Every structure is written in structure tokens, then in C-alpha cells.
Amino acid sequence: MTDFFKLHFFIPLGIVLALIIIPYVGYMANLQLVLGIVIPYLAVLIFLEGLIYRVIKWARSPVPFRIPTTCAQHRSLPWLKKSLGDKLDNPETTLQVIGRMALEVLFFRSLFRNLTTKLRRPADHPEDAKLFYWSYKWLWLGAIAFHYTFLIVLLRHLRFFTETTPGFVQTIEHVDGWFQIFQPTVYLTGIILLVALTYLLGRRVYNPSMRYISLASDYFPLFLILAIGTTGVLMRYFFKVDITAVKQLALGWVTFKPTVPAGIGVIFYIHLFLVSVLFMYFPFSKLLHMAGVFLSPTRNLASNNRWVRHINPWNYPVKFHPYIEHENKYRQAMKEVGLPVEKE
Amino acid sequence: MKEPVKSEFGTVGEKPKVEKKFYNRNLILAGIIVFVALITYPIWNLQGKSVPPPDPKLDTPVIQKMAEQDRKCIEDKTYMRNYHMQMLDEWRDQVVRNGNREYTSLSGKKYTASLQNTCLECHSNKSQFCDQCHNYVGVAPYCWGCHLTREKKLAEAK
């Protein structure tokens, strides 16, 4: 453990613990109005405003070059056929680009290609070390488990914001609580979410090279979402709150008639405060890859450099010196030494 | 003074003027609009509607017959509101698996652990009591897959 690690690991941990204490103190000081109405509204405003601002800022940067970061076959000689996989990896048309984007956004294709490197030394010839590259899917699995369970957890929360609950939310709840264990029914996604997050955190801590490149901004969202998930699970299964009052509060927000019903336990306000912080932190953090993935130039541009000219707008004007000017200047001399010329 | 050389990108020696432009404007605005519309779904879904909070009724014949000081549930109101589902789950295990029908409340009073004979004895109005909150928060407990409600029983008896 280096000081670097301590700094980047323990400071975000301390901040998240403080973020748990703040709403607790606020609750004790009867600041439910602030915790239950002011901060959530503020958080949603910051989230939306920040997200739109960042996306438009990105859109104002020209991206003239197509970056064919791909291992697939480029368009080439007519007898070099491209398979469907090649087309999705190295798209030439908009439709193929949409295919590549869908694979990236829905299935995390880039992570699926993640490799691990190992230096293998045969026991009898230790000096004969060889570097092996091998497929490594754990990161992909952890990431996809986390993202999809987080989405499902988010959608499940719609039951607090709608009246009556839409059918698809009920279907999700039904499938999620398939095993009907415990009461209220244990949702599998809640558990998978926490397990996946723990893996994503453990990966950074246990792997020395990962630990070396992990920063506070990597640990903070992990701690924050872990705290959100943990308070959510605690609230649902252990320290229960009056759920009808919670729904009254949530419906108050969306109908713009906010009221704070009495009798909601402190753990709800902790959960809500952490979620609000997540929303406020979102536009300023790496979490914005949610929007950024759609605007990643290595994914969303057709690789058509070879037949479409893309002009770089920040090109410095340069003085060109085409061959014909060169020849015009030295034609006589070239002829004298017998060099071929374009024009006589 | 040399004459300035022009090229297709501008005058040689000058800084290029990068136009501040909203690239792919329509596509990006469409994306933003779709995203905002999706996450504000609850707002426009409930626009102009007011949803009354649930109002579980306690005026069943059995409760009305009780003396004022006896009108108490087996545990206090907050506990019942928050933990009744857990209590019923524990009752289910204790009755079905261990054959134990005795429940001692936190105040020391003894009750029979039975949804149909204890809970529904007083709260015979499922649709105006249980369903009020259950429908409001969108939960569908599977109690009624096996248990009969008093309302059904009454209807069948008639």
C-alpha cells in the first residue's frame, strides 16, 4: 500500500461516510423539507442541465477524422469479402454504424474483447519466457451485471413515481422476485448489483497494476453506488420505512405539489441524499460515459476515409508546392540531364 | 514584404479559424429530447392528475363493536405498517413448518398466529383495507393465492 493508494482510496471513502452522516444530522435537526424536497429537485436540475451542457459542448468539437481502431477487414479488393462481423467492426454505412453502436451500448462489445497478458516461463527453461495474450471476460461480466441490474433497479423504482404502476414494471418485479423468498420478496437484481459492484471495487484494490492507475474519481462512484445499494437493501429488508408515505413524497415531486409526509425513517433520507449526490455528481464525472458512449468517435463514425475526404477545420494554412510547379521551374535542367517531364 | 500566400485553408501564416458549430445538430438534439422525455416520464404521465393517498378503512363491524380502549392492533400502528409482511411471513413458517400457532406481542399479550382467524377477524374489509395501500404502492402479495378473504366467504355464505 502506497501513500498514493491511501490518498485515492480513503479520501473518497471518508467523503461517502460523511455523505451518510450529513442526512442523519439533518434528519435529527428536522430538516426533512430540505432533504426531501430541496435537495432532490436541485439534484435533478443539476443532472439535466449538466448533462445537456456537456453533450452540446462535445457536439461543438469537430471530429473530422475517422479513426479505424478496428481489427476487422477494411474495404479492399473485390475478392476480399467482408463477413457480417467485419461489417459490424469496421462499418462502411450508417446502418452498419448503428449495428456497431448497438453492440457497444447494449452488450459492451469493447469490454468483451478485453485481454489479459501473462508471462509464462517453462519450469525447465525459465529464461525462455513467453508473453501470452488470452481472453479475459470477468471485467465484461462484472460490468454488464452491474449496468443491467442498476437499470432494472432504477426501473423498479418507477412504482413510486407512477399511479398506477405500468405493466412492464410489474413484469420486471415479478421476474426479479421469481423465487419468492423472504417477505418482502427478495429481488435478485439487488443482490447481483452489490456483488458486481464489490467485484468492480475489488478488481481495483487487489490487482497491483489496477491499483496503481485507480484514482479517487474511480473509487468515489463505486463507494457511492455501493452505499446507495446497501441503504436500499437495508431499507427494504431490515429497517423498514412507511412505504406509502415514501410514495406520497415521490408523487409530490412529479406532480409539483411536494409535501413531506411525517413518519419516514431516517434510512430513507440517507438513501435519498446519496442518490441526490449521485445525480449532482454525474455530469462532472466519469459516469457521464452514459452519454459519452453515444458520442465516441472511434465507435460512431463509418470508416470511410479511403473514399470520402474529411477536411480538418483546424488545419494550418500551408503553402503547397505541387510537382507541376517544381517541373515548371526546372524543366530545362531536367531535360538536359535526360529526366522525364510531364509537359514538353 | 512578401505577398501573402493563399491556400484552400486560408492565408499562410495565419491561425486557422475553426468555426464554432453545433455538429450533427439534429441528431444530437433528437437524442437529448428522447432522453429527457424518457426520464421525465413520471411527470408527463401524471400531469394534472392528483393521486389521493391511500385511506385504509377501520370501520368493520367487529372493530365497531369493540370498546374504545380495546381498538388496538396486536402491535402498534407504525410497527404494523412497516413490518406486517415480515410478521406474516414468520407466522407462515412457524405455523406451517413448526405447528406453532402462538404469537406473543411485544406488550406480552398472546394471540393466535393466523391471517384468516386473527387479522381478518377485525379487518374483514380486504378491498378497503389491505388493497388500499397494496394497490397504491403497486405490490401484489401472494397471500390470497391460498387464503380466503372474509369478503369472499361472506359472499359465498349468502
Image (spheres, rainbow, N blue to C red):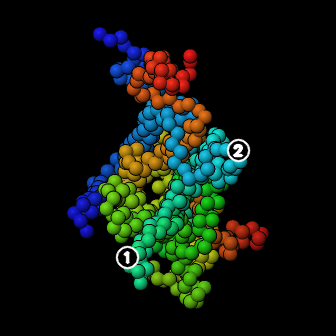
In this rendering, is residue B23 above or below A223?
above
Residue that mark 2 sits on: A78
Up/down of A171 relative to B34, above or below:
below
| x then y, percent, for residue B20 | 43, 26
Work out whether mark 2 precedes mark 1 in sequence or the reverse, and give the earlier one.
2
Q: CA distance from mark 2 to mark 1?
A: 46 Å
Q: Are marks 2 and 1 on the same chain?
A: yes
Residue A39 percent across, percent down from the top left: 37, 46
Q: Nearer the viewer, residue A138 or A240?
A: A138
**Residue drawn 70% across the image and 50% down it:** A81
Crowd tier of the residue under label 2, counting other residues whose Cα lies within 10 Å: few below 14, some 14–19, many 20 or above: few
Parent chain of label 2? A
**Chain of the residue that carries numbered disc 1 in the rendered image:** A
Would residue B21 be found to the left or right of residue A1 on screen? Answer: right
The amino acid beneath tag 1 is Glu
Q: Which residue is mark 1?
A: A127
| Residue B46 sits in quarter | top right
Q: SS of the residue at dot 2?
A: loop
**Foreground: B88 or B45?**
B45
